[in-house]
């Protein structure tokens, strides 16, 4: 009995162990089946669009020889990140999507890969196990008319039958660049809506940049400066870069402008120009106070230029593209160093520059973190219209702020130059007045005295001589000396009226006008209002202006009558000079006449306004200056 019991116990024990073993095997089988099961994207009635996160499976064919019929789907791995990023592997990369139309109607959808430059793009559509559609040999050079959808990106339409499961296989390859290819599923209506909305945003931003570029070109021609040239090239580079990255160059520009090489060249040129611009904008002397930083800036620019030469003339591949991406990223560090140095030096433009680039740098950082996979940026952050609006409005903001700053610098520079010019003109006018006074004094005291002595001696000779012919000659000589004395007195008076500071502007002008009449020209002086004295410097310049206008009438007007009116009002003084001559409009248009230039200069110097109205019936000059703060106490 004991033996039977032991055999029975052993049998029970073995049965128990077998059950346990079967349970474990079943568990692992179920786990394995579940792990091999692929996620299926369900399309319902309310479907609009999806970034397909958690539904894409990828496989990289390192041999580049596997066809769609040779694929082993068990080798596909679920892609965990939100956007497809294959880096610069240069291999054929397969993407698989399983989807099912759960609605009761057929669905017209679009599979959109948001990328412009691909060397190879193929797709295969399966309904169940049957291949119902395929397209091979598409690349970035394929014209829009030859594509399934008139789109710069790689997109194709599918009509999904109700309650049917589909498998979509996509093969992509890029040998000369970074392969970052977000894949999105849209309804056709939503695809068209977003496509149009994005193009509207993009072209609006590019149009504004183009207008800014034209304005900067105008200023460059008007005020040639290095900073404006760098600004202009910087804008053009950004416009070209934007058109390139969005595919417009690939489809609408010559072939040499739509290659990966040109894309790399244009992006590198922008980086180089951004450094030149920052140096001239923040550090106008184009060198750092720290000699080491100056050497660093120049060395880095030298490296960029050498690299630019290399990618322009040597074979271009994905390694060069990757190197270019990293070299360009270092530009941000160099720009940051320039900005920090400007802030330390308390340069106002360094704060303006930092403020202007903040939106652009924010978008660049988001894109860099997303593309490189350093940080997991949510798909909705980068793919909605608000982000794209910000992406292309940010450069517009940057160039508007920088343009206003440059314009303000030009205005301030011209203001400084104008102030310096006014000071120089003031000094010249002061020197001129001093010289006029000295010459007038010398004419009166020296030459006038000499002529008076000569006249006295002639009178003595006149008394001694009795010859009639001699008397006649002496009389002629006396009249010539008298005329010379009068001319010298008149010239000296015009240069500096005697006692001007005492007799004032009114009496000096009255004397000047009364002696201005000639044989064929009659001058009239009119005064109105109570005389109010102005500072001597203002009055002497008003006198000089009026004297110059009278001189112009004598020389050019061919007038028979002229008048000078001195009009004192409560708030201002007006001097009107009129003639009935032939005018001089042609000379004004040709900007001729030193006299008029001197008149304008003196009027501007004392803060007066000069208005000239000339025509065939004569000319009118109106000179006005405020009375108040200028009134002599």
Image (cartoon, helix red, strand yellow):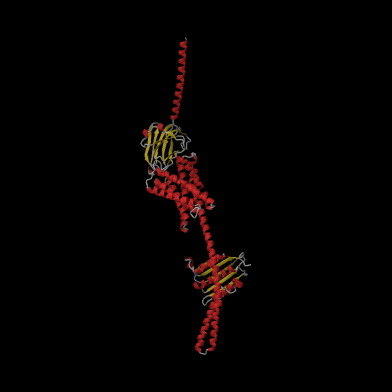
Quarter of the image containing the C terminus? bottom right
461 vs 257, left or right, is right
Taking depth in this image into account, of 633 and 49 the one nearest to the observer is 633
Taking depth in this image into account, of 304 and 155 the one nearest to the observer is 304
Residue under the image location 45 percent in, 28 percent down: 34
Taking depth in this image into account, of 339 and 256 the one nearest to the observer is 339
Q: Residue furthest top?
A: 1
Residue under the image location 45 percent in, 25 percent down: 28
Q: Residue furthest bottom?
A: 466
Above/below status of 356 relative to 165:
below
Among the 4 quarters of the image, the one containing residue 426? bottom right
Residue 610 in view (yes/no): no
Q: Tell how many labels.
A: 0
Above/below status of 321 relative to 42:
below
Give x and y (percent) for residue 107: 44, 36
Give x and y (percent) for residue 418: 53, 61
Q: Residue furthest right?
A: 633
Give x and y (percent) for residue 597: 51, 67
Taking depth in this image into account, of 316 and 249 the one nearest to the observer is 316
């Amino acid at each position: 009995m004991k033996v039977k019991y032991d055999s029975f116990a052993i049998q029970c024990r073995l049965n128990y162990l077998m059950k346990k073993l079967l349970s474990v095997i079943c568990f692992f089988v179920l786990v394995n089946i579940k792990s091999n099961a692929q996620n299926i994207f369900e399309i319902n009635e309310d479907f609009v669009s999806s970034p397909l996160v958690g539904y894409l499976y990828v496989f990289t064919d390192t041999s580049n020889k596997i066809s769609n019929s040779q694929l082993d789907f068990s080798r596909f791995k679920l892609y965990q990140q939100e956007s497809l990023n294959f880096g610069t592997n240069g291999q054929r990369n397969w993407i698989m999507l399983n989807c099912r139309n759960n609605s009761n109607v057929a669905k017209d959808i679009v599979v959109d890969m948001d990328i412009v430059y691909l060397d190879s793009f193929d797709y295969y559509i399966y309904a169940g196990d049957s291949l119902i559609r395929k397209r091979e040999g598409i690349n970035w050079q394929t014209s829009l008319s030859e594509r399934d959808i008139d789109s710069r990106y790689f997109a194709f339409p599918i009509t999904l039958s109700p309650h049917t499961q589909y498998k979509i296989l996509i093969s992509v390859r890029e040998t000369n660049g970074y392969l970052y290819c977000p894949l999105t599923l849209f309804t056709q209506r939503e695809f068209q809506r977003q496509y149009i909305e994005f193009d509207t945003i993009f072209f609006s931003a590019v149009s504004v940049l183009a207008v800014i570029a034209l304005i900067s070109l105008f200023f460059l021609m008007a005020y040639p400066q290095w900073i404006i040239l760098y600004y202009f090239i910087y804008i053009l580079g950004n416009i070209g870069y934007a058109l390139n990255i969005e595919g417009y160059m690939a489809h609408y520009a010559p072939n040499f402008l739509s290659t990966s090489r040109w894309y790399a060249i244009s992006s590198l040129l922008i980086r180089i120009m951004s450094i030149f611009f920052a140096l001239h904008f923040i550090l106008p002397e184009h060198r750092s106070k720290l000699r080491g930083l100056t050497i660093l800036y120049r060395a880095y620019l030298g490296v960029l230029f050498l690299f630019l030469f290399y990618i322009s003339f040597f074979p271009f591949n994905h390694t060069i593209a990757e190197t270019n991406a990293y070299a360009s990223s270092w530009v941000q560090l160099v720009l940051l160093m320039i900005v920090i140095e400007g802030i330390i030096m308390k340069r106002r433009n360094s704060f303006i520059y930092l403020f202007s680039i903040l939106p652009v740098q924010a978008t660049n950082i988001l894109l860099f973190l997303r593309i490189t996979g350093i940080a997991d940026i949510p798909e909705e952050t980068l793919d909605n219209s608000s982000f794209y609006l910000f992406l292309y409005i940010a450069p517009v903001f940057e160039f508007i702020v920088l343009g206003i700053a440059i314009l303000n610098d030009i205005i301030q520079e011209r203001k400084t130059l104008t102030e310096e010019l006014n000071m120089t003109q003031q000094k010249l006018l002061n020197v001129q007045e001093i010289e006029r006074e000295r010459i007038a004094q010398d004419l009166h005291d020296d030459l006038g005295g000499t002529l008076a002595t000569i006249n006295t001696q002639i009178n003595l000779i006149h008394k001694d001589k009795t010859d009639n012919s001699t008397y006649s000659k002496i009389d002629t000589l006396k009249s010539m000396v008298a005329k010379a004395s009068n001319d010298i007195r008149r010239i000296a008076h015009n240069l500096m009226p005697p006692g001007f500071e005492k007799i004032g502007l009114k009496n000096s002008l009255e004397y000047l006008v009364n002696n201005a009449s000639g044989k064929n020209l009659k001058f009239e002086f009119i005064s109105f209002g109570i005389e109010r004295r102005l500072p001597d410097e203002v009055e002497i310049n008003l006198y000089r202006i009026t004297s110059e206008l009278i001189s112009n009438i004598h020389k050019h007007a061919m007038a028979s009558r002229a008048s000078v009116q001195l009009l004192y009002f409560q708030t201002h003084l007006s001097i009107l000079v009129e003639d009935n001559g032939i005018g001089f409009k042609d000379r004004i248009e040709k900007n001729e006449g030193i006299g008029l230039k001197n008149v304008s200069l003196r009027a501007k110097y004392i803060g007066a306004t000069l208005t000239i109205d000339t025509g065939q019936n004569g000319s009118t000059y109106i000179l006005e200056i405020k009375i108040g703060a200028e009134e002599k106490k």
